[in-house]
Image (tube, helix red, strand yellow):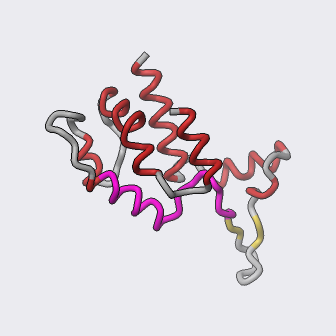
Amino acid sequence: MMHIENNVYESMIKFIFGLKDTIKVRRDMEVCGIRKHLWLKRDPQRPGKIFKPVAPYVLRPEELQTFMNRLASLKVPTDYCGSLGKHIMDKKLRLMKSHDWHVLMQQLMPLALRGLMDAHVRLSLMRLI
């Protein structure tokens, strides 16, 4: 059970960090005819260039910095979650143990996401957790 939970949490982190929001994904959305507001757009200032509209489920750079700062500044008891501090210092939340993922998502993620993202996206993430 913990390994399934680990995979779901890691995938969710990749989504909100924007690691899974690629140009291929946006083209697939266009082919499928879904989420028209997220399709690739032509850049009017630079002819021949395209850009990705901002997705509501991806943290903007300043929000990502706030998110990581909140996690880094949390004070937790010794051995509460083993290697979480090391991963936060590297600004990479992956390759953690299942227990660390569990603690991060169940208890620390709601604190770190408070006030970030659109409310409906944030609440959906909280319900999934």
Tell me where residue 26 appears, x and y as whole percent. 71, 52
Q: Residue at x 25, y 54 (%)?
A: 89
Tell me where residue 117 appears, x and y as whole percent. 56, 56
Q: Residue at x 36, y 33 (%)?
A: 101
Farthest-out residue, right = 33
Q: Quadrant of residue 80?
A: top left
Q: In this orientation, which residue lies closer to the viewer: 101 or 128?
A: 128
Is the residue 129 above or below the residue 89 in the image? above
Farthest-out residue, top = 1
Q: In this orientation, which residue lies closer to the viewer: 90 or 75?
A: 75
77 sits to left or right of 73: left
Tell me where residue 129 appears, x and y as whole percent. 50, 33
Tell me where residue 65 appears, x and y as whole percent. 40, 63
| Quadrant where the N terminus is found in the figure | top left
Asked if the magenta segment contains residue 125, the reply would be no
Q: Quadrant of residue 128?
A: top right
Farthest-out residue, bottom = 45
Q: Residue at x 55, y 46 (%)?
A: 15
7 sits to left or right of 88: right
Q: Residue at x 50, y 57 (%)?
A: 115
Asked if the magenta segment contains residue 62, the reply would be yes
* Magenta residue span: 52-71
Count of numbered marks: 0
73 sits to left or right of 59: left
